[in-house]
Amino acid sequence: MAQLPAQTLHRDPQLFYWILIPITVVMVLTGVLRHYASVLMTTTPKKADIKAIREQRALAHGASLRTNYHVLSRKAFETRRDFLIEGFESGAYLKAPNQKGQPPANPMSDPNAMEGMMGMMKNNMAMMIPNTLIMSWINAFFSGYAIMKLPFPITIKFKSMLQAGVLTKDMDPRWMSSISWYFLCIFGLQFVYVFLLGSDNAASQIAQQMQQQQMPVGPMAPGQDPHKMFKAEAENLAVIEHYSVLDGIEERLLERIKV
Amino acid sequence: MSEQELQINPIVQDSVAHNTKTLTNLHSLTASLFGVGAGILGLESYYGFLFYIAFSITTSLLFYILQIAPSSLGEGRTVLDSGRYYRGALELWTSGIFNGLPGFILTWTLFYGLVRA
């Protein structure tokens, strides 16, 4: 089979100045803007009332005792465990001890929970709005040009995506239009942000999406009865079989310094 | 038993995250420079990706020699063992290839377009 001759296409060099560079600059600046917007939009945590903080901290205390019991000696662990279990079961740390048995309030009516949801909404908005704006901007001004050639071959399936707006049937799918340069920029500009903003930046949307997927659930999920959570924590503490990291330390030490 | 060993020699999550981030940043910055190189040389298809993989592994190797080896060998570990800073061998040697790939393709395409096409 004869080798097909490579398609050549003469393009106006002005395409680079008026399409490629504007899109790239806009993408970089949007990332920088997104970073500073997210820095400015982080709300300082609201001052919680002292009882609510005590409730949270008591639960966190129980959890950290449960995960770190091995650094305590047996006696110290047992003293702490008994103290916490007693407090947990009597409801001494509850925010409102008199409404122990009542069903939890609707999370939508709780202003604190609403705050958290608003924060998430803001983040999503900060990603969505620039994307739709830039997409429509590129579609309105720059559609219908083939500006560049990819350096590697791809299958014909990508043609409709990469050459959106370029209605030439026989053109090599390696030629790409401005919208595909935009997609390349979305995925590949991370290094620019690292260079400009440092590694802790909030500019890249890819990194943000990954973060959102693995966001940890807070210790006080809204809509749960705190008394029930205390009861469960007390049960968890009661079943721990204690051992210390110092068990058998003499043998380990001697083994290490033996010649 | 392994849980107990982990408690005797604990692993601090912050340090793990810091090590990983250092490596990721290095790879994403160098990958874009490799893209510039591949674009100016006018490499196409397989040669471009081979160029990238070879240089990415070279970067990992240099990172090992300059940053990890002095303290790692001093601790009595074998050569090319990254266990002092990274939990799996793959994390040091191959994760960078995937982290830097988008940046590489971006600059490769850009410079290939500017120089050749």
Image (spheres, rainbow, N blue to C red):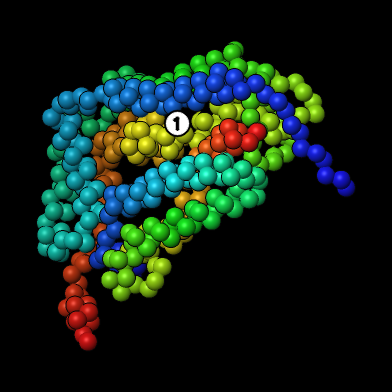
State left or right for residue A142 relative to residue B71: right
Residue B38, image quadrant: top right
Most foreground residue, A51 or B43 = B43
Q: For label 1, count other residues whose C-alpha is less than 10 Å away and answer few (under 14), some (14-19) or many (20+).
A: some
Q: Position of residue A109 (x, y in %)?
A: 32, 18
Residue at 69% across / 34% down in the picture? Answer: A174
Q: Position of residue B42 (x, y in %)?
A: 61, 43
- The amino acid at mark 1 is Gln
A199 w.r.t. A84: above or below: above
A173 w.r.t. A129: above or below: below
Residue labelled with disc 1: A205
Residue A257, image quadrant: bottom left
Most foreground residue, B110 or A23 = B110
Furthest toward the top, the residue is A140
Q: Position of residue B94 (x, y in %)?
A: 49, 56
The quadrant of the image that shows the C terminus of chain A is: bottom left
